[in-house]
Image (cartoon, grey):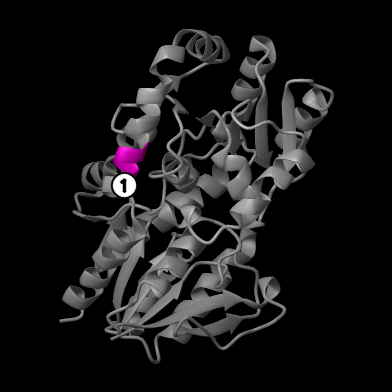
Amino acid sequence: MKVAIIGTVGLPANYGGFETLVEQLVRHNDSGNIQYEVFCSTKSYPERNKSFHGAQLKYVPLKANGMQSIPYDIFSLIKATKHADIILILGVSGCAFLPIYRLFSGKKIIINIDGLEHRRDKWNKWVRRFLKFSERQAVKYADIVVTDNKCITDYVKDEYGKESELIAYGGDHVLKSHNDPEIEKVLNDYGLSAGKYALSICRIEPENNVNIILEAFEKAEKRLVVIGNWSNNTYAKALAEKYRNSVYLMLLPAIYNLDILHAIRANCNMYLHGHSAGGTNPSLVEAMFYKKPVIAFDCVYNRETTENKAIYFSSASDLISQLHEKKAELKSIAEDMFEIADRRYRWETIASQYEQLFLESGL
């Protein structure tokens, strides 16, 4: 069965959660029942390999993100139509085109609608309206809708009256193939001591509540490392300027070297997760595999992902109280996080669920 995957930057994964999902689907294709075709942006891959772990790579001369994501997805969709039995669309950017596409193609389409993009604070009202329209078309014209969090599943049912397939996101890849002997060097290079700092990894955007986390740790005089894109928007730049001289806060740029990232993650004393939008967030699931206590922003998505067993906050003062009052519970919370991740978020299970979906929908 030939499955085309569109909507991501491409392979090998070097951007975000959907890219990691695609890479893990390809890597776990042990049965050989699926022939994957993955569409990639030429803007992100100067060296254009023809294949990756058995998957065929096709290149599109557009950026996969920003405004170009719409023509990028549409172009990929049209190009995928020729050979694919099933088309897996990740995200809804190009789905406004589906009413037209359905006039000339009856291809089987599966769409993972991701989180609720139209609710993110970073978008203006016109972008939100477009994303909501695209989401509506995605749900209407997809043969199968995939959701990665039960709260998103319930939303699709309540909002559109349509059932969806619940398949979460994996995270155990973060524990594999790392150069452990380099850990001490990495910590020394960054001036960190094992177990002496908290950690947060995210895009620096309003809906991730980075301002709340930074304010709380600064006032509580607790050591915190935040890894993110500090120069991509006015919100991020303002926070970087405000806290650049803090003795408690270390603001690091995005890190893509997996050995460095592993060393910093493995040696933090807790993980802070401020995301308030979306479904099952990749950085949260990945942190849970490190058996670290999680303190997460109090929203339904995070509570569902962590089965109500993490610590939750909704304001800076609330977070400060949690930092001071929950010390005795941290060890048991860390164990709970790993148990949940091990049970629900292993890639072998996730890939198998997608493969079964492809095979059954292609019958």
Q: Is mark 1 on a helix, strand or loop?
A: helix
Quarter of the image that includes the N terminus: bottom left
Residue 93 showing in the rendered view: no
Q: Position of residue 333 (x, y in %)?
A: 37, 26
**Residue 67, horizontal then vertical, whole percent:** 63, 61
Q: In this view, does 288 lie above or below 299?
A: below
Percent across and percent down for residue 222 are: 65, 17
**Near-viewer residue (335 or 119):** 335
Give the residues in magenta.
Answer: 338-342
The quarter of the displayed image where residue 199 is located: top right
The answer to whether 286 is drawn above or below residue 302 in the figure is below
Label 1: how many Cα within 10 Å (few below 14, some 14–19, many 20+): some
Locate residue 292 relative to residue 247 in the image: left or right.
left
Figure quadrant of the C terminus:
bottom left
Residue 208 in view: yes
The residue closer to the viewer here, 182 or 117, is 182
Indicate the position of residue 147 as horizontal and vertical percent values.
31, 53
Residue at image coords 31%, 47%: 342
| Residue type for callout 1 | Asp
According to the image, label 1 marks what residue? 342
Residue nearest the viewer, comparing 232 with 286: 286
